Amino acid sequence: MVPFLACVLLFLFGLYAVLLKRNIIKIIIGFSIMEYAVNLFFAFAGFKRGALAPIITEVGVVKDFVDPLPQALVLTSIVIALATTALMLAMAMRIYEKYKTFDITEIRRLKG
Amino acid sequence: MVELYVLLVAMLAAAIVAIETKELLAAIVAMGIVGFSVAIGFIMVQAPDLAIVQIVVEILAVVFFAAVVLRTTSKDTTVQIRVTPVMIFPTIVYGCFALLFAVLVVLAFRELPSFGSPLMRVASDYIAVGMKQTGAANLVTSVILDFRAYDTLGEAVVLFTAVVGVLTVVRQFGKKEQLDKADKEQ
Amino acid sequence: MKGMSAIVQTVSRLVAGMLFLFGCYIILHGHLTPGGGFAGGVIVAAAFILQSLAFGSVEATEQHRYTFTSVFESMGGLGFVLIGFIGYAAGHEFLRNVWASFGEPLRLVSAGTIPLANIAIGMKVGAGLFAIFLALGASRFKMKD
């Protein structure tokens, strides 16, 4: 259970950065760290001790394989995390261009 | 699995550096270290597909972050040296929430199968019939493109939406500058 | 966006082509070895990003590149949907793997529509990520004077 708890601790670090930091780039870094933690947790959930990677090399020979289902779910999640991070970065760039700062306490006016 | 625990400690230390440091470029490099440690963690749990994708995605994420930070500013101006009372109270509240969350998580994880022996109720069927039914030797590919192909379709739609969103948010200013330039030339 | 020095340009001229070939290899062999459409698509995007960073780009060519990448991304997305309709037209459900027993297993020509779907996904992911990079790194507004 210790690797699972390490993933949850990494998730809590990321959540701290999202909630309590005032710089937008730090908030986006926090989101990224949260997504890494969740993906790592899924991969840990599928691990079987002493088993091999789920690639068949000889037809008909049955070997001990790791669970391929969490790996399939995490594969698309990694690429989607990159896409949403890029979208957040684009918005952060526009905010800097308009307000000349990344500090969220100085971005008061939403319209303008 | 001593190396797995050493890796997890390194990952947590890099995450702390990424969150707290004042230089934004150093924070991006530390986030890159977290990403590569996650990729090594994927290799240690026998997931080579995930390791390949995580390494190249991490490289692209660092490139995107660096592209944004180098065009704007590279110093975090909100980090203060003195600790004021305004900063202490939210941190304590978050600490209590995190402690409560951790206690509930430990109680919930007792119900999970332990690390190293998954249940594999559906996956054992996929492993048994995967090669015969789909003809693919890579079982993870046969899962994402044959047994669960709708999820891949959904992912393609999400990626498309993200690309359209980025191009819309960023290119709007280019159009305004173009119009201004056209007005000035007239 | 300015280019880089002559050493970087010479090396990237060699490496970008090899990266693109490597990405195509990982896409095509997705049903035999680890990798597949997503990993190969991101590597292809990295090859284009390397070339774009090393040689810089004049603003006139950027519009041309946006159009080009959007065409490839749309072709990838539509290709995946059309592959789904192949299964529908053959009498089974949508997104069914129809030619699964054509060819022997563990060869390149096997596994039905899985390599075709990998190619479509690879095109889509690669073109999409390159378009995001062009928008973030090389778009037209200047912020640091």
Image (spheres, rainbow, N blue to C red):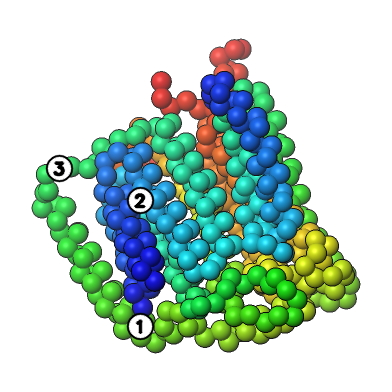
Direction from residue B172 to residue C44 in the image, left or right:
right
Quadrant assignment for the N terminus of chain A: bottom left
Query: Would you identify the image quadrant in which residue C108 lies?
Result: bottom right
Can the viewer see residue A91? Answer: no
Residue C41 x/y as whole percent: 65, 50
Alpha carbon distance from label 2 to label 1: 28 Å
For the point 37% across and 61% down, which residue is it? B7
Can the viewer see residue B137? Answer: yes
Task: Please state the chain letter of the residue tagged with numbered disc 2 in the rendered image.
Answer: A
Residue at which label 2 appears:
A27
Residue type at mark 3: give it.
Answer: Ile
Alpha carbon distance from label 1 to label 3: 39 Å
For the point 59% across and 25% down, which residue is it? C9
Residue at which label 3 appears:
B81
Residue C144 x/y as whole percent: 41, 25
Which of the numbered marks, if any, corresponds to residue B108?
A: 1
Alpha carbon distance from label 2 to label 3: 20 Å
Direction from residue B114 to residue B80 in the image, left or right:
left
Residue type at mark 2: give it.
Answer: Ile
Direction from residue A19 to residue C139 in the image, left or right:
right
First along the sequence among labels 1 and 3: 3
* On screen, residue A84 above or below C97: above
